[in-house]
Structure formats: C-alpha cells, structure tokens
Image (cartoon, coloured by chain):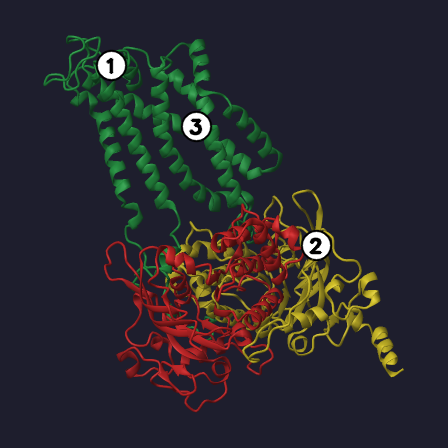
Chain colours: A green, B yellow, C red
Amino acid sequence: MTALTSPGLTPGRFRLAVRRPRVPRRWRTPLMIVGFVIIGAWVLVALLAPLISPANPLAQNAAPLLPPSAQHLFGTDENGRDVLSRVLYGARVSLPLGVILVLLELVIGGILGAIAGFFGGWVDQVIMRFTDLVFAFPTILLAMVVVAAMGPGIFHALIAVAAVGWPVQARVVRSLVRTTMQSDYVAVSRLLGASSVRALRVEVVRNVLGPVVVLATLGVGNAILLLSGLSFLGLGARPPMAEWGSMIASGSQNFQDWWLATFAGLAILTVVMGFNFIGDALRDALDPRSVTDEAYGQARPAAGEAA
Amino acid sequence: MTVLELTDVEVTYKRGDGTPVRAVAGVSLAVNPGEIVGLVGETGCGKSSLARAACGLTPVSGGTVSFEGRPVRALGARERPAEDLGLQLVMQNPYSSLNPRRRVEQQVADGMRRAGQHAAAGGEHPVRVPQTVQELLALVGLPPETARRYPYQLSGGQRQRVALARALAAQPSVIVLDEPLSALDVSVQAQVANLLRHLADELRVGMLLISHDLAIVHHIADRTAVMYLGRLVESAPTRELWSSPVHPYSSALIGAIPTTGSVGRLPEALAGEVPDPASPPSGCRFHPRCVHRMDQCQVTEPPDFGHGSGWQVACWLADPAVSAALASSEEA
Amino acid sequence: MSALLDVRHLGVTVGQQGKQDKPVTIVDDVSFTVSRGEVLGLAGESGSGKTMTALALMGILPPHTQTSGTALFDGRDDLLALRGNALRRIQGRRVAMVFQDPASSLHPMLTVGRQLTEHMRHHLGIGKREARERALDLLDQVRIPNPAAALGSYPHQFSGGMRQRIELAIALACDPELLIADEPTTALDVTIQAGILRLLNRLCTERGLAVLLITHDLGILSAVAGRVLVMYSGRVIESSATGELMTGSRHPYTRALLSSVPHPGDAQASLVPIAGTPPSPAGRPPGCAFAPRCDFAEQSCVAEVPALALLGDDHACACPVDPFLAGDRR
C-alpha cells in the first residue's frame, strides 16, 4: 500500500520550532555548577576525612580552647580536640543522615501520596486527613518525646523527624499524581486502551519524578539543618560525637572562643547552600521551555532541518 | 450503517454548590463512515460535554451512545474493551493533550498497542491505516524527524497533527474532534482542516467535528448540526444550512459572522445572553432571544420537524401546521 | 483635517541576551495615519509585529526593546519619545488600549466599580460621586445590564463578552481620542463579537473616536474598518481602503491570506493554505520576507526589501513583481 500523504504539504518544507539542544544550556547554569562544586567538595571531605584530617576528632590531645594556629587551623575545643578534624568528620554524620532522612520521608510520604492521588475519593480523603494530623505535630516536641523514651542519639532524632516530616512529600506527590492523572494526555491514553495502572506507570511517573527530585534536593539541606538543630538542643548527637550542631551548642556557651561555633556553623551554611543551589537549578532546568523566548524571536537556526 | 450514533443523549453534572446542570439535554445525531459531521455552538451550549460523552470518556446520564451498533461503556477503572478502540478523540488543546515528557514516537505508538491486536483479530476497517510511526507521521504531513522529538519542540499545529496521528494509529472508524482548530493560528487552521477532509475521504474515517467556528466547519463538514443550550436546534447538509437556515438561532449565528465578501456590513448581533444551563427557559430554550417568537414558543418545547431529506429543525416555525396557519392568516 | 496619529518609520528591536549581540528587528519601518472617527485596521498573523506596534505606541513595550521613528499624536507629542508624567498624561487618558483576553487584563480582586472609578479619578481628578455616575453611564453605554449591580461585582462574575465590554468601558472612561484595540474579540463567540463590533462602530460615529483595530481576522476588518494595513514579518506590505483590499488586493501575501480563510457563502470550494511558515524575526531572509513562500518571487524580490509603492488612490503595495496588476477578482 502506498503511503498516503496529505495534499499541498511537502514534509521537506517543514521547519521544526527548535533546534535539538546538545547539552541543554539550562543545565549548565552557574547556579548548578556552584552547587555541585560545593556539594562535591563536601562529599569528598566526608569520604576522605580519615585521610585528610590532621587529628583524631575524638582525641583530646591538645590544650583546650586554643585559638586557630598553624598547628590547629581551626583551634581546639573545650576538651582539647582539634576543631578542624571535628568539622571534617562532621560531614560524615550530617551528609549521609540528611540524605537518609529525606529518602525515608520520600518513601513514606511518596507512597501514601501516590495512593491518595491515584485512587482519589475516600481513600484520598482518609490519607490526607491523616497527613494533616501528622503534619500538625510539632517536630521538636516529638523529638523530645522520642528522646525521653529511647534516650538521646542522632539516630533516634532521625526517626523522630522522619515520623513527622513525611507529610510535605505526601502532599506534593499526591497533588502531582492527581493533576497528571486528570490531565488530557492521560485521558487520551486511557481511550487508546491503557489501564489506569499503565497510565500511572507510563505517563504519570515521569512527570512526577522531576518535581520530587527537586523537592528532595532542597529537602536535604533542610534535613541537615533540622538534625543539627536537634543536636544543638541536646536531643540528637551526643558527645563526644563530632557533629556540627552539637559543636555549635557547646560553642555558644562562650562566644569569646569564637572558633568553637563559627566553623561548624559555616560548614552547615555552605552545605545547605550547596543543596539549595542544586535544587533551585534543577527546578529551573526541569521547567518546560518558556514560550516567551519565541515571541522575541531568539535565534534558533534550524540546524539540519529543511527550511 | 452508521458508525457512531447518539440517541437522546443527556449529560448532567453537579456544580460546586450541588445544583445539577443538564449540559446536554437530549441530543441525537449519527455519523456515517467517511462523513464529517460538524457540530457548532457557542460557549455554554454543552458541546464539550457532548464530545466527552460521545467518545466514551465520560458516562451519559440518559440516552445511549452506540459505536458500530454496540452501546459504548464509558471509561471506568478497567481497561477499555478492545472493540471500543475504534472510537477515538482529538482534543482542543495541543499543549496539554501530549505528555511533555514522552517522545512523539512513543505517544503515537500508544495507539497501535492494543488496537493493532484487535484489528489483526478481524476488526473491520475498510482501509488499512498504516501501522508504523513513520507512515503515520507522513500521513498527517509531518517529517520523519518529528518522531524523536518532544512536544515542546513542536508548534501548535504540529502537535495537533501528532494528536491526530496518535488517534489514527488505533485504526479508528470514527474520531470525535473537540475544537481541534481553535488553539491554532489561522494560517495553520486551513492546513489542518484540509488534512481532516483528506483523511475522512481517503481512509473512510467518520468524524464528529465540534467547533464554535461555523465558517471553517462549513468548508469541510458534510452535515452540520447547530447546538444551543444543550439541544440541537437544526441539523442539515452543510451547504443547505448555510444558504437557507430555518432556525432563527442558525440564521443569527450565520448572520453574525463577518465575511470579507461583504465589506462595510456590520454583523448582526443577537440580543441577550446565553441563559444558565441549570435553569433553562420554559418552552423553546431560545425563545427569550428570538425575533420570531410566538406564543406557543414560551410554553412548549418544539420537537424536531423534518424539512427535507436529512434536515431537522427544532422550531415551531418549521411545523407545517404553523406555517399553514401563518399562510392562511396572511391571505385573510 | 490633520491626522490624530501620524506614525512615521516606526521600528522596534529587541536587544539580545546571551551570545548573539545583534538586536532583532520585530517591527520595521511602519508608517500610517489615523484620523478622528476612523477605524484603521492592522491585519496580520501572529508574529507579524502588529501587537508590538501597538505596545510601542502605548509605551508599554517589554524590557530590552528599543524603538525608532516617530508617532506624532495630535500634531504635538511624539508618543515614542514621551516619558514619565508626560507619557502618563496621554496614556490611558487620550490614548487607551483594549487587550485580547479580558480575563487577564482585569484585576480579579477589585470590583468593576473600583477599577472604573479609580482610573477616572486618577486621570480626571474628579470626586467619588461624580466618578460613580460616570461609571454608571459608561456601563450603560457598553450595554452592561443592571449597571448599578455591576459596579459592585467582580470580573469573574461576568461572561467573557461582558468582561470585554467592561474593559472597553474602562478604556473609554477618560474619553480618549484614540483607542487601540488588540484582538478585542478573538476570544469571544461570534454573536458576542458582533455586538462588540457594533458598539465600536457606534462609538466611532457618535463620539468621533479613532480606532486602531489590530486583528488577524480580515472579516472583522471588512465589517468595520475603513482602511486596512497588512503586516508581514514586521513590515507593512500593503495598505488600502477596505473594499479595495478584499476584492482587488495586489500583494501575493494578501491574496494568499484571503484564500486561506473561509468565506462561507462564496463559490470558492476549498481553503488554500499558505505553504511554509513565517520567518522568525531573527531569521528573516534578505529582501522581501515573503519571497520564500511566494509563488511569484523573482530575483528582484530577494535582492532588496521592496518599498511600498503607491498604486494610485490610496492603495500602496510592497511588491515589485505586482502579479495581480490585471486586478482580477479573487
């Protein structure tokens, strides 16, 4: 059978709207690069801490409260431990735990949210009201309860936060799943014979993944802040563990010895900033191409496409 | 043998505050193979609700939709039955009817997945629609490179063609098109309209073309039905409807279109606004805005009167008894 | 009578960000006049530069744009050169604009009355009560039923056609001399559109309002415009009295455009779409922008940009080939 072609239309005369991007420019933004550099550096620090740190972070070898010097670049703390080493080792605590916390919340919240969004109706209502309930729980309070019950410790703090932190992800995932399941393209997909489950798998997941990744990335920064905050309050990491939050806590007791809290604080600052940069850059990158570009006629020579 | 038949279809939905709204209040029409039936109406007439019910996307609250002689069950939790896959839909908005994160070829291939099996198992179709993505794209006038593209790389007209190719991949015997041209540039509308006519002729696919643009419909539809506030007021062969519309709303609609052929002629305006479909006027739904209103129009809703072959008018003016009475009163 | 608006050699360019340094021309050497009581149609498809022309005249171009040429209003002020208070005295007061989508150009959180009166009080310096009375009168003129109730209502409570009328009322609030209407009826049903067009016509005849009506719909221009300018890729390629344009156009683009839109009731059997697509402003070909798509293009068309030649009797056309010289009916 000969191919039927449409009258008056020569396929060759078509020019598509946009040239195919090589490495999409929107991924190579300064924000993304800086973010990756920062986080990349900290990941290396976390991995290589035993190799690059000048001293054992737990060893009380030196005189206490020494200001920064050639021997102790960040000084020593009230127990004579090298602050620089403690800051470097702190990365081994905060980074993995931050990521684990976000993943935990994502799993719990994501699954609940997806179920709610997919089924709608009373299932949605029940899950969402339960989510609201958990959401209303003050995080710090619960952490205190857990600590009172199980004793302090960074892992206990992690569990406490995950237990009340997942509603944010649940809401986002539920909203995304719901909107995409109700979209025109899913409707057409169903008319073409796909089942709801197939539609979820093939059409919805890929649309949900992007925003979820952005949320997770931004969430890591938040998680680290939260865990450090709990440690600061004495509900998380216990001494002598080298953890940034507890370092700030002990450092806040005497501000003259500024090096005790400052470097740990800077560490938290840069790590959270790095994750936020990546998250923001990801969000921009995953946005569909803006239509206003074309209204201004930004140059897009149709490379390879016929005029 | 009609391929799509709507009989007294009603579609009711509940508004936010709970009031039931009969968006479609009893519509009957039929589409034959290879025929384009145009359904025109303005905002609030219920044509979109009708479109969604006609293709089986949403259930009807009354009446029946038959596809190839069998009643159509609306989409539910389960997969759509294979024998209904020949009834397809093209939507208005080409920016939302394609998944932004899947390539064109994947989306066009969707149509082939199950329908191909059905066709192979002996589903009837007079002309075999090509079953490769490349051939389907060529059929709608898109170059082969389009297959690997993402929707954001295509213009509105190109996306609409992709949507058409996707629907064709399912070997449809009838396609419901809900305002397929409205979101497109005027220059592109002509191209896509011609494409539709070509496909209907060559592939013998029936089309229910829903639009507010009477002028474009006039160019490609074999028959045209005019919808107002949930009911069809007139349906006739397109040329005849255009040259001598019977229902006052049809003439108002036609008279309101400014054409380049009549310079300096102000288009006719229609008094009043479309009433709320939740509380339609008594009797004939159009009577508050009708210049030919008679007493009985306010009281009783007119049935369909035949006006010649394939011509129905839901207006008391078309009632032979009425026109006879008018004639005799004139003579008197 | 001197023209109310005299536009000469208007140009709009967009400055490029990123790697490309050359500014892109969106509007190129556009000239026209609008007289009181006249409706001038500006016809073109999307991307023809017609909207940018309007925005330039109103002084509300997007950032990173530059204008050239002059737009003399009432023989005195150059709209393109005005800034600050001088611009505000004219913009909204003597020259008003109506946009395509009333859903997005009316403030959703303010009542209709507030949007009308605030505008008036700012420009005319009148008191609350007088403003309210004027507002009622305006709503009545644009045929909004029950104006008193309408004043206290919000835009979302009205239908699309009503909203467009309200927008017109706001535009007319300060009794402007020139109204720029950019696709004012595109989003509306055809019967509603008919009402708006009649209203515009009435305003022109009763108030002597000058209207620059921008639209892609040649039918609308047939109905209400006295003269029409056709734009393609930022340039005016033909201008003439409306009747002359519809039946005796001389530019291949105008002809092609007329053949590609439906003319119900005409003998013409099918639509003939124009092959290809308009060039992007950055990718405009040398010479005539329409040449790549033109059935009659010759060497002279590509060599240089065709100038608008006067074909006698107020009909100008920018086509050196002039294939329709015989002037046969479309």
Relative to B221, is C88 on the left or the right?
left
**Which callout, 2 or 1, points to the residue nearer the camera?**
1
The residue carrying mark 1 is A255
**Which callout, 3 or 1, points to the residue nearer the camera?**
1
Give the residue displayed 31% in from the left and 33% down from the top. A275
- As rendered, which of B83 and A27 lies closer to the eye? A27
Q: Are marks 3 and 1 on the same chain?
A: yes
User: Which chain letter goes with mark 1?
Assistant: A
The residue carrying mark 2 is B277
Q: Are marks 3 and 2 on the same chain?
A: no
- Mark 3 near mark 2, Cβ–Cβ under 8 Å? no
* B58 shown above or below A92: below
Residue A280, quarter of picture: top left
Q: Position of residue B290 (x, y in %)?
A: 74, 67
The residue carrying mark 3 is A105
Q: Amino acid at mark 1?
A: Phe
User: Which chain letter goes with mark 3?
Assistant: A
Relative to A301, is A177 on the left or the right?
right
Q: Secondary structure at mark 3?
A: helix
